[in-house]
Image (tube, rainbow, N blue to C red):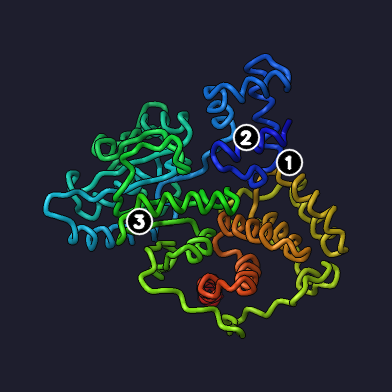
């Protein structure tokens, strides 16, 4: 039953359910079985015929995790680029911005705050905000947020753009509500409004990492169609490699993860590529994990600062994964990774080890996905950066590897400044 649901979710919304862990699918299935008072076979017949139930299952699967001004450098670049793009438009034509997926609204409202703070008038821009989940769209439209939605360094945002409610929550200012239009939509196109076209700036962050490669390409085809030729696309930190391989080039603005369509053809990959500094060549054939010195030397590090501290059980699970990997028991280590995700949730360290085990076993695509998930959770996870860069080199993506190496150098500089 789980396998059939995973395939259904892939066909409906392009979701690679393995990125969430089998436990997430099982929990959602139990929830919907109870809600419908059905056994598994009856439910399978029901969900194949009911679009309403398909949406309900998707709602049960979607667990948004976001906050205002996540990756703040992106919003600084947004406003400077918006001014440059505005000068190319006919007088009086507003800039068109898109946030997809918009989740519970923190991202599109952050875009609006950034534009207002940069002295854009309300009539000079319009933001469309779309998400596949009706539940989060309703939350976003309500515009009411708890303290956990505010994790940035600018406490003045709440004073300027929110009204404090009696229950301690914060309600969005009407100025922001007026420039953001929320609606349901699927990036894969089947339920997207036909008006999605000619956007000057698109935020599509941390979505592609949940898709398999064919679905990533379908999504990028639509993004190219909706984005103006000179428009700007913001992605997540783990998605840069995908963009660079599909006709986009980075603006090279630190921590902004911004791209536009490449204007010049990519140079051919040399027969003997020069590796980025400090990235070691990979062996032509993957070695067993017990023979990989890098694996033997690495002990688990604490989880990223942005994550919750690991419990004793979670830390013990990571130690078990490390021991199995170091002993060359890769199949057992992969099983332990899946169990860790189900029992304790995602962490950068877990996804790094998961990628490392797949990498050592020669499963390159799986390794790419897990390294990128680690960097989604902790953009400066140094070992994930180094191993992903090395893997990209073997696949001919030298520009992607160079960007990762640049981030490594930035982290080294930051660490040196603290010492």
| Residue depicted at x 18% and y 56% | 89
218 relative to 414, above or below:
above
Residue 8's tag is 2
In this view, the mark in front (2 or 3): 2
Q: How many residues crowd mark 1 within 10 Å: few (<14), some (14–19), many (20+)?
A: some
Q: Percent position (x, y) of residue 366?
A: 68, 57
- How many marks can you see? 3
Residue 343's tag is 1
367 relative to 123, above or below:
below
Q: Nearer the viewer, residue 247 or 381?
A: 247
Query: Disc 1 on helix, strand or loop?
Result: helix
- Going from N to C along the chain, the mark reached first, 3 or 1, is 3
Q: Residue furthest left?
A: 91
Q: Nearer the viewer, residue 193 or 259?
A: 193
- Whole-angstrom CA distance, mark 2 to mark 3, is 36 Å
Figure quadrant of the C terminus: bottom right
Q: Percent position (x, y) of residue 1?
A: 73, 30
Q: Is residue 302 visible?
A: no
Residue 75's tag is 3
Taking the image as shown, residue 39 lies to the left or right of residue 408, namely: right
Q: How many residues crowd mark 3 within 10 Å: few (<14), some (14–19), many (20+)?
A: many
Query: Disc 3 on helix, strand or loop?
Result: helix
Query: Disc 2 on helix, strand or loop?
Result: helix
Q: Percent position (x, y) of residue 294?
A: 76, 72
Taking the image as shown, residue 108 lies to the left or right of residue 63, namely: left
Taking the image as shown, residue 313 lies to the left or right of residue 96, namely: right
| Residue depicted at x 45% and y 74% | 266
């Amino acid at each position: 039953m789980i396998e059939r649901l995973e395939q259904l979710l892939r066909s409906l919304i392009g979701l690679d359910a393995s990125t969430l862990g089998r436990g997430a699918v099982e929990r959602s299935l139990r929830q919907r079985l109870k809600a419908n008072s059905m056994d598994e076979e009856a439910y399978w017949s029901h969900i194949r015929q009911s679009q309403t139930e398909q949406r309900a299952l998707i709602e049960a699967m979607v667990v948004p995790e976001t906050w205002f001004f996540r990756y703040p450098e992106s919003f600084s670049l947004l406003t400077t680029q918006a001014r440059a793009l505005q000068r190319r438009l006919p007088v009086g034509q507003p800039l068109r911005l898109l946030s997809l997926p918009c989740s519970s609204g923190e991202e599109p409202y952050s875009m609006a705050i950034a534009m207002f703070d940069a002295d854009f008038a309300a009539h000079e821009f319009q933001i469309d905000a779309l998400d596949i989940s009706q539940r989060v769209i309703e939350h976003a439209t309500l515009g009411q947020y708890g303290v956990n939605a505010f994790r940035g360094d600018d406490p003045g945002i709440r004073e300027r753009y929110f009204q404090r409610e009696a229950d301690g929550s914060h309600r969005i200012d009407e100025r922001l509500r007026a420039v953001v239009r929320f609606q349901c939509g699927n990036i894969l196109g089947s339920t997207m409004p036909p008006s999605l076209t000619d956007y000057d700036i698109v935020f599509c962050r941390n979505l592609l990492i949940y898709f398999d490669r064919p679905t990533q390409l379908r999504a990028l085809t639509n993004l190219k169609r909706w984005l103006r030729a000179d428009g700007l696309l913001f992605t997540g930190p783990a998605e840069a490699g995908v963009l660079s391989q599909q006709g986009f080039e980075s603006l090279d603005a630190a921590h902004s993860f911004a791209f536009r369509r490449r204007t010049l053809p990519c140079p051919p990959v040399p027969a003997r590529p020069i590796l980025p500094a400090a990235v070691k060549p990979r062996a032509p054939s993957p070695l067993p994990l017990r023979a990989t010195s890098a694996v033997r030397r690495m002990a688990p590090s604490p989880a990223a600062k942005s994550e919750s501290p690991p419990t004793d059980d979670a830390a013990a699970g990571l130690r078990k994964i490390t021991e199995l990997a170091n002993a060359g028991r890769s199949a057992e280590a992969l099983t332990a990774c899946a169990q860790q995700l189900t029992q304790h949730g995602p962490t950068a360290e877990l996804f790094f080890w998961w990628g490392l085990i797949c990498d050592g076993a020669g499963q390159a695509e799986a390794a790419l996905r897990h390294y990128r998930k680690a960097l989604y959770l902790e953009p400066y996870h140094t070992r994930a950066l180094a191993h992903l860069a090395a893997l990209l080199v073997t696949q001919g993506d030298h520009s992607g590897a160079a960007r990762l190496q640049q981030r490594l150098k930035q982290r080294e500089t930051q660490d040196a400044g603290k010492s």
